[in-house]
Image (cartoon, helix red, strand yellow):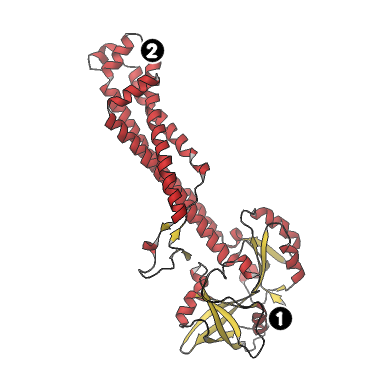
């Protein structure tokens, strides 16, 4: 049977090669698009969490709803230390969030002032790694008469036309309505990957933000960073007993449900692409087998006349379809895996999607910035399904020609009329 299958396929070598090549290209596209989608969505989720959110956050329950300046938590270092000791926790960053008018000369902008612990914040987000100029905040606030330190997002720094060493005037909204203005000095400029953060955020020492906002000893949120591979739900369950009464613990998925929905829609929509590719593969295999069956109808008639059973004849055609699909799928897997491995090592250049020709930092979509190079991840577990799906498609496509050939009347088939 195997010899018959190989002999039949070798009769029209060009048709066989083209069919196998079409299947291989289709499967290679599936492997590549799957890897690209995974890398893109992973980068999107990582940018959202590592840019500012962290993996989990603790807020006052009312603050989580309306982000009011007065809905605060008590600054409790012992509580944060207990959370930091839990398995899988990389960092626990206390924060105070306020609004301010910040400017220099004739330029100004309303900004979000984020008071942070200079040592803990880099354990939760990429603020320190994202520095484009200058340095991160010093370990502790400088003593007077030195000016208070701030680090600006790249977009805000460009709008104000300032850089490390420049002075600014910041006027913060205060809890008691008193003036919250002071001169500050820019010590660094960073890019987190979030367009909104980079255009509007000002990072300041937590103690300075508490003093200027008249919220000494208070926090608005505690951001928690998890180690790579840590289970989000398990971490939430472990942290929950350490959450103070009246506070709310939320994962990043609960904080930005729109982003989660966007990721889920993107993952679901990829099936439409798979459907189109498999439809094209099916048409190619069906056309090949149907043409082959029509050309060999006299041969089938002779085989039936000398005693070949219809079932054996039908099985031969089905095996031919499966052979075409399996060889094509294996070649496609090899080709797709090779391309993905290349992009895993060298990245995929996305600079064509940058906002301008001179933008060397990256491109943005849906308010999230990406590097110009996206690095793929080769997931070997996702290489087997395309082979199985292609074989299933080939089986279905081979059934119709097989049934037609098996039911053919030997007399009319040998005469060329069947």
Q: Earlier in the sequence, mark 2 or mark 1?
A: 1
> Which type of secondary structure does the marked residue at label 2 adopt?
loop
| Up-down relation of residue 111 to residue 26 (above or below) | below
Dot 1 crowding, Cα within 10 Å, few <14, some 14–19, many 20+: some
> Which type of secondary structure does the marked residue at label 1 adopt?
loop
| Up-down relation of residue 196 to residue 384 (above or below) | below
Residue 98 position by quadrant:
bottom right
Q: Residue furthest top?
A: 306
If the image is split into quadrants, where does the N terminus sit? top left
Give the total number of marks visible in the rendering.
2
Whether tag 2 and tag 1 are in contact, CB under 8 A, the answer is no
| Up-down relation of residue 331 to residue 396 (above or below) | below
The residue that label 2 is drawn on is 309
Q: Give coordinates of residue 149: x percent, y percent.
A: 60, 82
Q: Residue 249 has which mark?
A: none
Q: Which residue: 43% across, 62% down?
A: 372
Q: Give coordinates of residue 82: x percent, y percent.
A: 75, 64
Residue 172 position by quadrant:
bottom right
| Up-down relation of residue 200 to residue 8 (above or below) | below
Residue 386 position by quadrant:
top left
Q: Give coordinates of residue 17: x percent, y percent.
A: 31, 33
Q: Is residue 51 visible?
A: yes
If the image is split into quadrants, where does the C terminus sit? top left
Q: Which residue: 55% across, 68% down?
A: 129
Q: Which residue: 64% across, 58% down?
A: 227
Q: Which residue: 30% across, 35% down?
A: 18
- In depth, the one of 111 and 83 nearer the eye is 83
Q: Give coordinates of residue 416: x percent, y percent.
A: 23, 17
Q: Residue 216 has which mark?
A: 1
- In depth, the one of 61 and 159 nearer the eye is 159
């Amino acid at each position: 049977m195997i010899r018959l299958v190989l002999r039949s396929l070798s009769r029209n070598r060009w048709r066989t090669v083209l069919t196998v090549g079409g299947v291989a290209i289709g499967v290679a596209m599936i492997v590549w698009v799957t890897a690209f989608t995974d890398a893109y969505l992973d980068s999107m989720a990582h940018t959202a969490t590592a840019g500012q959110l962290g993996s989990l956050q603790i807020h006052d329950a009312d603050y989580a709803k309306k982000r009011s300046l007065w809905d605060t938590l008590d600054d409790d270092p012992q509580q944060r230390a207990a959370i930091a000791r839990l398995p899988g926790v990389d960092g626990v960053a206390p924060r105070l969030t306020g609004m301010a008018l910040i400017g220099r000369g004739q330029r100004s902008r309303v900004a979000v002032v984020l008071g942070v612990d200079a040592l803990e914040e880099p354990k939760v987000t990429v603020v320190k790694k994202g520095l484009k100029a200058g340095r991160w905040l010093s370990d502790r606030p400088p003593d007077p008469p030195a000016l208070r330190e701030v680090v600006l997002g790249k977009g805000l720094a460009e709008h104000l036309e300032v850089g490390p060493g420049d002075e600014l005037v910041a006027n913060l909204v205060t809890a008691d309505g008193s003036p919250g203005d002071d001169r500050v000095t820019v010590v660094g400029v960073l890019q987190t990957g979030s367009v909104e953060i980079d255009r509007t955020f000002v990072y300041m020492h937590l103690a300075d933000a508490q003093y200027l906002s008249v919220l000494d000893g208070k926090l608005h949120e505690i951001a928690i960073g998890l180690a790579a591979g840590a289970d989000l739900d398990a971490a939430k369950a472990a942290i929950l007993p350490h959450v103070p009464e009246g506070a709310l613990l939320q994962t990043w998925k609960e904080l930005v449900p729109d982003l989660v929905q966007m990721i889920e829609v993107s993952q679901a929509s990829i099936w439409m692409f798979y459907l189109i590719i498999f439809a094209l593969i099916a048409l190619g295999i069906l056309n090949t087998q149907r043409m082959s069956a029509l050309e060999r109808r006299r041969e089938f008639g002779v085989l039936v006349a000398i005693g070949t059973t219809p079932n054996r004849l039908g099985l031969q055609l089905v095996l031919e379809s499966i052979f075409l699909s399996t060889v094509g799928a294996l070649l496609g897997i090899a080709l797709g895996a090779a391309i993905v491995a290349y992009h895993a090592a060298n990245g995929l250049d996305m600079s064509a999607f940058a906002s301008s020709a001179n933008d060397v930092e990256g491109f943005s979509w849906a308010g999230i910035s990406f590097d110009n190079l996206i690095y793929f991840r080769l997931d070997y577990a996702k290489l087997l399904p395309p082979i199985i799906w292609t074989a299933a498609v080939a089986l279905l496509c081979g059934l119709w020609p097989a049934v037609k050939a098996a039911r053919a009347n030997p007399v009319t088939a040998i005469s060329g009329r069947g």
